[in-house]
Amino acid sequence: MGKNPIQQEVTPSGRGARTGLILIIGVILLIGALAASLIYGSTVLKITTVWQALFEFNAEATQHQIVNEIRLPRALTAAMVGAFLSLSGAIMQAVTRNPLAEPSLLGVSYGAALALVVTLVFFPGLTSTGSVIVSMMGAGLAVLLVFSLAAISKGGNAPVKLALAGVAIGMFLSSLTSVIAMHFDVAKELSFWYAGGLGGADWAGVKMLAIVALVSIPLVFILARPLTLLNLGVEVTKGLGINIRLINALSVMTVLLLTGSSVAISGTVSFIGLVVPHITRMMVGPDYRYLLPVSAVLGSLLLVLADVGARMINPPYETPIGVITAAIGVPFFLYLVRSERSRLV
């Protein structure tokens, strides 16, 4: 039998120290990955050149401009998007009590993509800030549709019902997006959001993601303990004085902020929100006070490395980053499905 979650809450027995060590190692690896992102690309730069570009910037040097105006914002964008998607996946898995959940489960990514294609058709000159806001509105609409569909069915609050409603709404929104894109001849532009990529990352996007982080990260810390208690079940959690509706509302709001901004900047990068929380749970356990920060660091690390790989696989062309994350995520997803089936049998 597994340990009682209450015992884990009261007596972590060294888990905090272990988590701290994992975080330190993860941050060191992340710094190395960020350095690799600045060095490698269509042109491989020397470490000394990157160092000078960062700390002794010369506006007349082309390589310094490449580092500061292209590669640095791209690396920071990859790090933040990876963290955002990992946190979203971890929160979704707790709220829906579904181990296979990720942001696309509630149609969040598809709703954001639909809003973006409508914007692309009718407001092509919208700024980065406007795109992020529209993306969040689309994501919110998707979540509203999913919960409405689940509510009218029997047992609508059940994880399975939410998952099925999310898949149905996601397919509907994806189809609607494709129809609009083909009708208005913007399918080529839309392919960026479906494939996922960081080629268009700039400082405006970095600033928007930073603002979202300032708003959402405090919410993540607030949610850590209640999400851990949800492992005990809804009735037990209510008995411990936790307002389930408030936690669900804050969780959905946080997921909308994190996922909506990520989709607006990088497109639909799949499986990060599925793979990373599971790997983290294997390393630090189910306590969300530990799971969430480690998920953020590992998500950043994974997406930065995936972005480096996207540039190095077939230079000077870029491989869509969504292809790389899918290549990692699909086998892991099949493994999880098989594990869940074995557990139910």
Image (cartoon, rainbow, N blue to C red):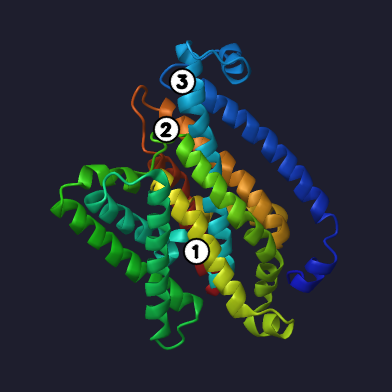
Q: Which mark is residue 101?
A: 1
Sequence-wise first label, 3 or 2: 3
At label 3, which amino acid type do we have? Ile
Whether residue 126 is situated above or below residue 246 in the rendered picture: above
Q: Residue at x 48, y 30 (%)?
A: 308
Image-quadrant location for residue 301: top right
Residue 201 image point, x, y percent = 43, 36
Say which element carries label 2: helix
Question: In the drawing, does residue 136 fall left or right of residue 4?
Answer: left
Near mark 1 (Cα within 10 A), the count class, few <14, some 14-19 or many ≥20, is many
Please, what is the three-letter code of the amino acid marked with disc 2? Ala
Tell me whether the residue at label 1 lies in contact with that at label 2, contact meaning CB atoms closer than 8 angstroms.
no
Q: Taking the image as drawn, is residue 218 in sight?
A: yes
Q: Amino acid at mark 1?
A: Ala
Q: Is residue 186 above or below residue 161?
A: above
- Reply above or below: 121 against 52: below
Relative to residue 218, is residue 326 drawn left or right?
A: left
Q: Position of residue 18 (x, y in %)?
A: 79, 49
Q: Which mark is residue 66?
A: 3
The residue lying toward the viewer, choosing from 162 and 7, is 162
* Residue displayed at 74% across by 40% down: 24
Do we see residue 278 in this rendering? no
In space, the residues marked 1 and 3 are separated at their CA atoms by 38 Å
Label 3 vs label 2, nearer the camera: 3
User: Can you give x and y, in whole percent of width and height, for residue 10 in the image?
Assistant: 84, 68
Instruction: Tell me how far mark 3 sits from mark 2, CA to CA.
Output: 18 Å
Q: Relative to the observer, which residue lies in front, 195 or 189?
A: 189
Residue designated by label 2: 310
The x and y percentages for residue 129 are 43, 47
**The furthest residue to the bottom:** 154
Q: Quadrant of the N terminus?
A: bottom right
